[in-house]
């Protein structure tokens, strides 16, 4: 069983106190440091105390009786024995079919399954422990397999890559027309006396509940209302900007802003925030299943096994410093790129929107996205303990970039279609506003405050700016 989330932050607080149990504050009080160093050490201790206090305030308290039952063991020997028996059966008792294509598929699937068995039992644990650490190790290994598959597709020719999809499903490898959601945008069509609201019903397909469920889960990942709304609105602007490349980006105005932003996305974000509020207030008291006397308590304990072990409230605070501001911008950019990849990938690989591979990709991101966001937040919020980006976050970023490179290679003509001039002007204006605000918030405003105090020279000011930029870009 992995260490609880609350214990990790506790270790972080312990590690900053110094070696051999002597804290920096005690060294100052005991006179074991030089007088000119005491001010810097006190400042460091004060900053460390603030960070530790902030970290503890964003985490819920957890009670766990520490029961280590059969359920929590890794069972490495058992898995190895079962795997060996399966391989012995295939080798000695099963007759190998005389079908090269079938044997190739079976060999690839067997190789993947062996890798998954290794990863589920031996891979490094992530930040999540419920419903079981092996569940999240499994998805980590699936992430590796998916990234390797994308790399393989990237290194094929366009024709071979599209035809390779036939090995997964013989129905693939055939160009498909894109559906245009625009057209007649009248909410009430008086010309259709049978059903004047037919335009609304025509757009009520399976993607409507998918929008709601998707944004409900994204809210649980991001845990911030403002970031979710910004990503939701920004993606609608991207659809406006890129509808000349993909026809299914063309939608009616009320489909963009009423059905998507307000109804589906907005309702999903609202329900997600309500769930976040419940998770942040819920008491996390974990007791071993066999230590609970009543059957009702046992059933309730089994149900709560599929809820988080503990809960951390995300406080992104993008305007607090330049490093966090750039990180939040990067998160929003990667989210939007991953959303666009969904549409462009099925276009360049000729997959219909209702194909099960499209659904499997969404299920994949649902399971790995939450872990990746938690690892990114830990890396930003507690860099003294989390000194490197988490493994799942690293892989998700690599997958997003690889998917985009496949799109660029397989259909550069679509990607390079010139954006209309007025749309380009709007995006340039938005980028200029973001750049201007960044410059004012983290440089000009700080400069004015420092110059007003009159306690620092010009050269020292320039050095401080260079140092802050260097730290932010590390």
Image (tube, rainbow, N blue to C red):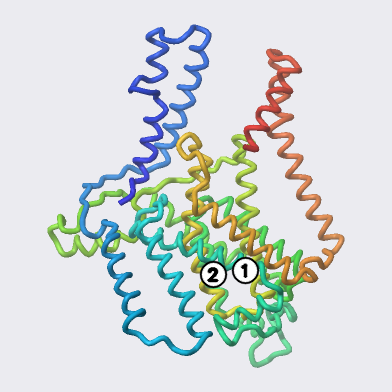
Which of disc 2 and disc 1 is earlier in sequence?
Answer: 1
Res. 307 visible in picture: no
Q: Quadrant of residue 52?
A: top left
Residue 57: x and y in percent read 41, 37
Q: Which of 141 and 52 lies nearest the eye of the viewer?
A: 141
Residue at image position (74%, 36%) is: 439
Element marked by disc 1:
helix
Q: Residue furthest left?
A: 293
When the figure is inspected, residue 355 is found, relative to residue 80, above or below; the finding is: below
Q: Is residue 196 left or right of residue 435?
A: left
Element marked by disc 2:
helix
Residue at mark 2: 361
CA distance for labels 1 and 2? 8 Å
Residue at image position (65%, 29%) is: 468
Residue 396: x and y in percent read 55, 57
Q: Which of 305 and 233 lies nearest the eye of the viewer?
A: 305
Residue 283: x and y in percent read 30, 48
Q: Quadrant of residue 341?
A: bottom right
Residue at mark 1: 342
**Do callouts 1 and 2 mark residues in contact (Cβ within 8 Å)?**
yes
Residue 193: x and y in percent read 68, 91
Label 2: how many residues lie within 10 Å, few (<14), some (14-19) or many (20+)? few
Q: Residue furthest bottom?
A: 194
Q: Is residue 109 left or right of residue 461?
A: left
Residue at image position (65%, 38%) is: 473
């Amino acid at each position: 069983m992995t260490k609880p989330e609350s214990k990790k932050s506790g270790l972080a607080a312990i590690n900053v106190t110094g070696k051999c149990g002597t804290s920096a504050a005690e060294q100052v009080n005991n006179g074991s440091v030089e007088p000119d160093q005491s001010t810097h050490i006190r400042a460091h201790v004060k900053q460390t105390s603030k960070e530790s206090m902030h970290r503890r305030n964003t985490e819920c308290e957890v009670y766990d009786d520490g029961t280590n039952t059969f359920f929590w063991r890794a069972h490495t020997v058992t898995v190895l024995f079962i795997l060996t028996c399966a391989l012995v059966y295939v080798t000695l008792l099963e007759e190998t079919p005389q079908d090269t294509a079938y044997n190739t598929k079976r060999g690839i699937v067997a190789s993947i399954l062996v890798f998954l068995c290794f990863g589920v039992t031996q891979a490094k644990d992530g930040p999540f422990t419920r419903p079981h650490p092996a569940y999240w190790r499994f998805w980590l290994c699936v992430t590796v397999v998916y990234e390797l598959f994308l790399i393989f597709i990237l290194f094929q020719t366009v024709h071979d890559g599209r035809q390779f999809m036939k090995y997964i499903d013989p129905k693939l490898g055939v160009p498909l027309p894109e559906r245009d959601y625009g057209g007649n945008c009248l909410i009430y069509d008086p010309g259709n006396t049978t059903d004047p609201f037919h335009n609304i019903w025509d757009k009520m397909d399976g993607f409507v509940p998918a929008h709601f469920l998707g944004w409900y889960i994204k809210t649980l990942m991001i845990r911030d209302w403002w970031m979710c709304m910004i990503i939701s609105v920004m993606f609608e602007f991207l659809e406006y900007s890129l509808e000349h490349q993909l026809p299914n980006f063309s939608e009616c105005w009320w489909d963009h802003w009423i059905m998507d932003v307000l109804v589906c996305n907005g309702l999903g974000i609202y329900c997600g925030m309500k769930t976040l509020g419940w998770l942040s207030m819920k008491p996390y008291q974990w007791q071993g299943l066999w230590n609970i006397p009543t059957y009702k308590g046992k059933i309730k304990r089994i149900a709560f096994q599929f809820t988080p072990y503990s809960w951390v409230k995300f406080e992104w605070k993008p305007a607090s410093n330049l490093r966090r501001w750039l990180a939040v911008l990067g998160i929003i950019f990667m989210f939007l790129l991953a959303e666009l990849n969904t549409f462009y990938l099925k276009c360049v690989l000729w997959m219909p929107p209702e194909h099960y591979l499209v659904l499997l990709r969404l299920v994949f991101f649902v399971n790995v996205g939450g872990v990746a966001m938690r690892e990114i937040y830990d890396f930003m919020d507690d860099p003294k303990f989390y000194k490197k980006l988490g493994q799942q976050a690293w892989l998700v970023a690599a997958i997003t970039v690889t998917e985009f490179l496949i799109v660029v290679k397989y259909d550069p003509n679509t990607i390079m279609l010139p954006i209309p001039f007025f749309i380009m002007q709007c995006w340039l204006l938005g980028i200029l506003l973001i750049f201007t605000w960044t410059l004012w918030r983290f440089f000009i405003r700080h400069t004015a405050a420092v110059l007003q105090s009159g306690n620092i020279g010009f050269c020292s000011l320039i050095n401080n700016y260079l140092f802050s930029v260097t730290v932010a870009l590390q």
